Image (cartoon, grey):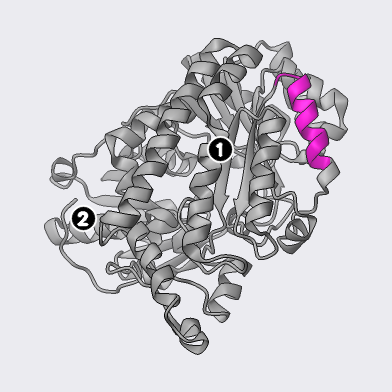
Amino acid sequence: MNVVFLTPASDLRRLKLYRLGGRFYGHPNAVTGPLILGGILKRAGHNVAVYEELYANVNYKKLMKNTDVFCIYTMTSTAKRAYEIADKIHADSNARVFIGGIHATALPLEALAHADQVITGEGEDVILDVVEGRNTEKIVRGQGRMDLDRLPLPDYSILKTPCHCANVMTTRGCTYRCTFCTTSRMFAPYRQRSVDSVICEIRRYKEMGFRYMNFEDDNFTADKERAKEICRRMIAEGLIFKETFFFGRADMAEDEELMDLLAKAHLNRVLIGIESLNQKALDEIRKGQELSDIKKAAESCRRHKIRLIASLVLGMDADTKEDIRSGVAFVKEMDAYQLQPAVLTPYPGTPVYKKYMEEDRIVTGDWSQYDMMNVTFRPANMTPWELQEEFYRAVRAFYSFRGAFRIGRLFGWGYGVRRLGLWFFALAGSKGAEFAAKYVPGTPYYKLRQLDEEEKHREPREKEQVLYMSSTNSVSTGRKKSGI
């Protein structure tokens, strides 16, 4: 059979200008799940292709002529687009459509309204039976393997869209369970691959000619001794890339040997979830870290020339505007290479979503807005539009023209140029959003600003009943014809 795996991207992220801006933030890569599942089907004799909409346009008209099965991966922010694609495939072809991924795992019945079958959880042990018709259950519940070494490696030969960076997952799950996190609930329990298995995969990507690599673990340094051994092996075997990204936690700075090995192995770009400088807010989301940990990590990264991407979560109930602004100022002072301000987003399946639903604080059902850049709920200490303004204020405050030159002096002028590009796109994006909020009816920003204006004129009881919903609510059921 001819099988196509699709990873959708929202309307905004398919724009040429957005794709160009993304090149300054990182390098084109691919979600590993479809590459693993596609590889399983390829070895079983099927013709398989994998496409990422984020990096290239996909010719669906051509694909639908000879594809038997489409497998669509969903995150919450791409669910609306995934359903649109699925509906179009059903309308214009006889192909079967399977939907899986994090969002489908949280809301399988919603996804089933647009699919022939839905695969929840981890799909390695069920994908072949589903595609070949032996498993016909409408909702197929995949179970994660405990021995990750038995899983096949991602097959990049089936990827048809640009990819300059290899992704490696050495673990699944996370040892922490922050209240807003989806992946720690999708991939549970926490499991590790052996160091030998990880090095075998890295060696393959080096032989394939990749210059960039990402460790996609939620926390690569969760097991510090294991992370050290991976770094030692990379150094000993010359498995060094021009740039290697990883996710870490502030507590990694407690181990000086670990920091030295990370730097020597060229793990030179790390995202650390600082989230907030308000300890009450950190405790609220069960972050499990102290302010002293954050400051120590920032200093250690700077000393080892590991470029820090600082993540701040905006809109937690304990945080005020002043807390957000002080967090941004702190990140600037510690010479972070990049800032990732993430609007707190109530993803289905998380405690935050359950809490906000019970409190009637969700203000939109348009899943495309659930991308950590758009406000989708009522914060405790400001209005939704005020929080949206704080997001763009944070971006403009951090990405300055002068700051690009400082980064160039610290890390090299090539990185300074990339930072200059981020300054331009951050400024253009924030100004565009503000313009849309004032003058472009129908856009999410306009609606969010109008919500503020409407609530100013409502009685307190009425305010509690206001529910701002998108005109294209993504939880609609039934298939409809739409252009893609």
Q: Position of residue 174 (x, y in %)?
A: 69, 50
Q: Residues within 10 Å of mark 1 (few under 14, many from 20)?
A: some
Q: Position of residue 339 (x, y in %)?
A: 58, 37
Q: Secondary structure at mark 2?
A: loop
**161 over 306 or under it: above or below:** below
Residue identifier under label 2: 95
Q: Which residue is located at x 46 percent, y 56 percent? A: 126
Task: Find residue 69 and report its horizontal and vertical position in percent.
Answer: 27, 51
Q: Which mark is residue 272?
A: none
Query: Does 168 sit left or right of 33 as displayed?
Result: right
Contact check, label 1 and label 2, Cβ < 8 Å: no
In the image, residue 188 sits, relative to residue 157, either above or below, namely below
Amino acid carrying mark 2 in the image:
Ala
Residue named by callout 1: 397
Mark 1: amino acid: Ala
Give the residues in magenta.
293-305
Task: Name the residue at 38% across, 53% down.
Answer: 78
**Foreground of the two, 461 or 98:** 461
Q: Give me the residue at 77% from left, 39% from top.
A: 250
Q: Camera-side residue: 24 or 439? A: 439
Nearest to N terminus: mark 1 or mark 2? 2
As helix, strand or loop, the secondary structure at mark 1 comes to helix
Number of other residues with Cα within 10 Å of mark 2, as a class: few under 14, some 14 to 19, many 20 or more:
many
Tell me which corner region of the image, top left, top right, bottom left or bottom right, holds residue 263: top right
The image quarter in which residue 196 lies? top right
Residue 7 visible? The answer is no
Eye-nearest disc, 1 or 2? 1
Query: Where does residue 12 sit, x and y in percent of width and height?
Result: 32, 46
Q: Is residue 11 above or below residue 224?
A: below
Q: Residue at x 80, y 49 (%)?
A: 289
Residue 381 visible in the shown view: yes
Indicate yes or no whether the magenta region holds residue 212.
no
